[in-house]
Image (cartoon, helix red, strand yellow):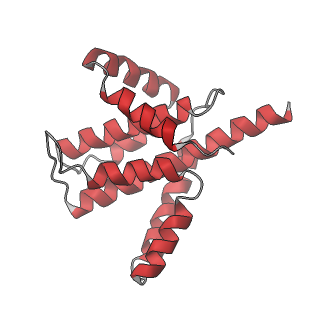
């Protein structure tokens, strides 16, 4: 399994922030064709959030998707809903167990949870935490921030698992 570098994460989000609306629509269409269940999961999971939070979720998903696509030379297979649901359940259970924990324990647990793709998860957390800054600040409720984190962390987990799978198949050949 390959850890995606901080440089690749930074290059990808910077490149995605500079694309035209037309190019963004084209790229999102491609992402929807290549990962239809994952995109449907993200869209369906944020329907209770306000429109700005929904837009942020879709944008962050798109950047995360491109990071993983740029992170391997292999083609990522479409991820089935069952795998997405499995990782979502795992992440929900982990968050529920950590909720009453001491803050120092939470910090350690968070480090362990980001171990496989620390720079991608850091990008996600930074983007959510900084949503209220910049030219167009976006006020996220605590619940919306949590939803975006849970949904997009699940997307990171399944994309990471798929990337590891395709890379291990290639290494066996």
* Any part of residue 33 in sight: yes
Seen at 49% across and 49% down, the residue is 119
Seen at 39% across and 39% down, the residue is 61
Q: Which of 111 and 58 is in front in this view?
A: 111
- Locate residue 153, reporting x and y percent: 45, 52
Seen at 57% across and 32% down, the residue is 78
User: Quick one: quadrant of the C terminus?
Assistant: top right
Task: Please indicate whether residue 61 sits to the left or right of residue 18 in the image.
Answer: right
Quadrant of the rendered image containing residue 75: top right
Q: Nearer the viewer, residue 89 or 10?
A: 10
- Locate residue 89, reporting x and y percent: 50, 61
Seen at 38% across and 27% down, the residue is 15
Count the labels in the image: 0
Task: Please indicate whether residue 71 sits to the left or right of residue 29 in the image.
Answer: right
Q: Report the residue that reaches farthest toward the right.
A: 173
* Any part of residue 39 in sight: no
Q: Is residue 35 above or below residue 122?
A: above
Quadrant of the rendered image containing residue 69: top right
- Locate residue 73, reporting x and y percent: 64, 26
User: Quick one: quadrant of the N terminus?
Assistant: top right
């Amino acid at each position: 399994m390959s850890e995606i570098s901080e440089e690749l994460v930074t290059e990808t989000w910077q490149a995605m922030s500079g694309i035209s609306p037309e190019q963004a629509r084209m790229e999102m269409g491609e992402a929807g064709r290549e990962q239809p269940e994952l995109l449907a999961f993200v869209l369906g999971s944020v329907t209770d959030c306000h429109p700005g939070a929904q837009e942020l979720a879709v944008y962050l998903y798109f950047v995360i998707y491109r990071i993983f696509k740029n992170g391997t030379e292999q083609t990522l297979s479409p991820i089935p809903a069952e795998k997405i649901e499995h990782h979502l359940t795992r992440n929900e259970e982990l968050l529920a167990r950590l909720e009453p924990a001491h803050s120092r324990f939470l910090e350690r647990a968070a480090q362990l949870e980001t171990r496989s793709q620390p720079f991608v998860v850091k990008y996600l957390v930074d983007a959510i935490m900084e949503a209220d800054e910049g030219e167009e600040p976006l006020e996220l409720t605590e619940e919306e921030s949590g939803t975006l984190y849970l949904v997009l962390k699940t997307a990171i987990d399944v994309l990471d698992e798929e990337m590891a799978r395709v890379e291990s198949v290639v290494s066996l050949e």
